[in-house]
Image (cartoon, rainbow, N blue to C red):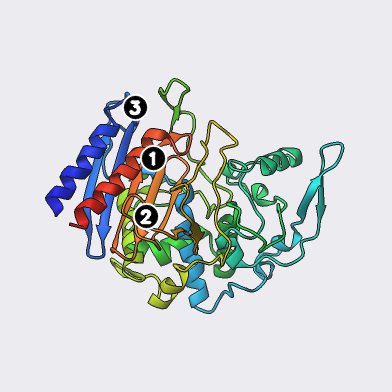
């Protein structure tokens, strides 16, 4: 299987950096419970630089950060230090100060009111707390602009102080809840989120090149984000890069890391919480966390309201999809071969991953391109996942 998997995956990686429109470079890996089944890289870290993409290249993970931050939350819950269903303002008082948007007045100023119920940490992980994301919600973008608050990409505490779009618990809306969940972790642990992750997740998993702030070694291996132009050309954004000293460790989007590291995290979930170098979560915590947490509610497509950052985004249009703590769940089998109940999500610069507890395989595909859901990037990823299932199901 290993040789046929290598040939099939290598072919996908080679194609996406050679065809037009191309990717600048890509790293992809597959694991089962025992170890890495495939590891490959193609193209360049920076298009035109001559520096090859390698499997130890460092990527901006963006929202692939969320699952790791959620793991830190789950650790506190299983230790009895955090009640997922208690008002989260008991841990982070600022959450009790946030109001709900009723609309905008004649002068364009937001009209706000008190929420009908408290936000819980479970809601923060499920994206049902009332927050949104201005990359995917036009009203939220208008609200942020009207209040003059910085974007979450600045990693400033002020960026989190946004009103809610709806009362907590009423529906699913992809947003900044996991950033706030990271603040809950910090309040309970008395440490920065990055320190907590290093001690409780990265060390037992052997993740040596993942952090909110780049080490010198990580900076040397960093791939740059590229902007896709209207003519499908790619421009490396050399003046766009990591915040040197982020004010907040953003649990929803702030990590940099390697695919090698992330595949260890995926393997831990396949192994019911056991990492390569120690236990991260109890099996019963993993079993709870991978269940649909939305009841009858479903997740929805994400419209790209900032075209330079994202196209319209939806995985497997037409298939029912739910949300766990904190992953997307497909309720039905997907065309790639992914069975129902598989965990998955992504990062804004076109990183994608899946964790399949049924087949017991998972994978990560990483490139660095804006906007999100780039046709070549997502197409290559889906082809990659498809050939993985074709080989492992033989």
Tags 3 and 1 in contact by the CB under 8 Å rule?
A: no
Q: Earlier in the sequence, mark 3 or mark 1?
A: 3
Q: Position of residue 240 (x, y in %)?
A: 49, 32
- Mark 3 lies on a secondary structure that is loop
Q: CA distance from mark 2 to mark 1?
A: 13 Å
Looking at the picture, tell me which residue is in the foreground, 297 or 355: 297
Position of 230 relative to 4 (above/below): above
Residue drawn at x 58%, y 58% as measured from the top left: 127
Count the marks: 3
Query: Are there few (<14), some (14-19), or many (20+) residues within 10 Å of tag 1?
Result: some
Which label sits on residue 47?
Answer: 3
Q: Is residue 146 left or right of residue 231?
A: right
Q: Position of residue 202 (x, y in %)?
A: 38, 61
Q: CA distance from mark 2 to mark 3?
A: 27 Å
Which label sits on residue 378?
Answer: 1
Which residue is at the far right? Answer: 106
Query: Are there few (<14), some (14-19), or many (20+) residues within 10 Å of tag 3?
Result: many
Which residue is at the far bottom? Answer: 80
Which label sits on residue 35?
Answer: none
Q: Is residue 260 left or right of residue 168?
A: left
Looking at the picture, tell me which residue is in the foreground, 165 or 298: 298
Between tags 3 and 1, which lies in front?
1
């Amino acid at each position: 299987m290993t040789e046929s998997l290598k040939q099939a995956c290598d072919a996908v990686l080679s194609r996406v950096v050679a065809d037009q429109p191309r990717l600048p470079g890509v790293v992809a890996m597959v694991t089962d419970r025992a170890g890495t089944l495939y590891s490959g890289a193609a193209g360049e870290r920076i298009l035109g630089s001559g520096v090859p993409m390698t499997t130890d290249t460092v990527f901006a993970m963006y929202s692939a950060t969320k699952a790791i931050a959620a793991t830190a939350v789950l650790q506190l819950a299983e230790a009895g230090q955090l009640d997922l269903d208690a008002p989260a303002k008991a841990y982070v008082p600022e959450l009790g100060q946030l109001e709900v948007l009723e609309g905008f007045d004649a002068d364009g100023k937001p009209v706000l009111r008190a929420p009908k119920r408290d936000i819980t940490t479970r809601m923060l992980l499920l994206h049902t707390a009332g927050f949104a994301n201005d990359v995917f919600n036009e009203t939220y973008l208008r609200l942020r602009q009207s209040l003059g608050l910085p974007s979450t990409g600045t990693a400033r505490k002020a960026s989190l102080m946004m009103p809610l779009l709806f009362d907590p618990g009423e529906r699913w809306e992809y947003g900044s809840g996991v950033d706030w969940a990271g603040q809950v972790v910090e309040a309970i642990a008395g440490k920065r989120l990055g320190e907590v992750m290093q001690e409780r997740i990265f060390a037992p998993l052997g993740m040596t090149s993942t952090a909110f702030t780049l080490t010198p070694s990580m900076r040397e291996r960093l791939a740059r984000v590229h902007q896709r132009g209207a003519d499908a050309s790619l421009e490396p954004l050399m003046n766009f890069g990591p915040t040197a000293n982020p004010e907040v460790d953003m649990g929803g989007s702030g990590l940099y890391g390697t695919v090698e590291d992330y595949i260890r995290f995926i393997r831990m979930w396949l192994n019911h919480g056991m990492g390569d170098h120690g236990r991260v979560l109890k099996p019963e915590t993993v079993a709870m966390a991978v269940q649909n947490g939305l009841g009858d509610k479903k997740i929805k497509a994400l419209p790209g309201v900032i075209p330079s950052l994202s196209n319209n985004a939806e995985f497997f249009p037409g298939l029912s999809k739910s949300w766990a703590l904190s992953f997307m769940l497909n309720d039905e089998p997907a065309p790639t071969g992914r069975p129902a109940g598989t965990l998955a999500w992504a990062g804004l610069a076109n990183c994608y991953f899946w964790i399949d507890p049924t087949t017991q395989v998972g994978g990560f595909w990483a490139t660095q391109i804006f906007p999100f859901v780039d046709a070549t990037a997502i197409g290559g990823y889906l082809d990659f996942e498809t050939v993985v299932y074709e080989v492992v199901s033989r």
